[in-house]
Amino acid sequence: ETSAYSYELQCLLDEAINLHDKYKKTYNSRHMREMVSNILSSMAPISVRPSGGVYFVPKKYEGKLKDLIALINELGNSEGYRIPVVSTAESKDMVRKKLKDHIKSAINEAAEYLKSNEKINTTIANTKLDLLKQVRLDYEEYKLVLNDELEDMEGALELVR
């Protein structure tokens, strides 16, 4: 049983309970992981570990990241943490290297698909193109974050273009 201070709040509370009951039967853990991944992807993450799980996210997304971490921690059997990165030459070098790896990985993935003997599948090709577009947007984001010379990546970015 629930109660609220006003009729309007009670209506909202009842709606939230009804939606919860409806969707808890509809969405499974795969859906939730996909949702979390999509939210994280919207924050220009750069994987710090090759296997994933640890990401660098620009400070501009601090509020959105805080909300995502709160959501992850509410899901049960899940945990997420925000660990600020101190702006040092070493941390900038790490981000620069991981960004370069991110760009190279996207280029290699698209190139391997194009070099394969498979008939080009429009859906897969569009997915690869979307990845390259996202890499380009991520690069622009990190160019601002690093506020440094990233000339060594300009050549790789030309391949993306």
Image (tube, rainbow, N blue to C red):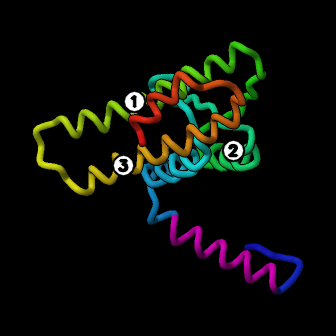
Q: Please, what is the three-letter code of the amino acid marked with disc 2?
A: Leu
Question: Secondary structure of the magenta portion, mostly?
Answer: helix
- Residue at numbered disc 2: 65
Q: Is residue 13 located in the magenta-colored stretch of the structure?
A: yes
- Residue 15 image offset from top left, x and y in percent: 66, 78
Nearer to me, 29 or 58: 58
Q: Residues within 10 Å of mark 3 (few under 14, many from 20)?
A: some
Q: Earlier in the sequence, mark 2 or mark 1?
A: 2
- Residue at numbered disc 3: 129
Q: Which residues are magenta?
A: 8-23
| Above or below, 16 relative to 117 | below
Q: Earlier in the sequence, mark 3 or mark 1?
A: 1
Q: Earlier in the sequence, mark 2 or mark 3?
A: 2
Q: Write the residue at 69% across / 44% down.
A: 65
**Disc 2 element:** helix
Q: Write the residue at 23% across / 39% down.
A: 113
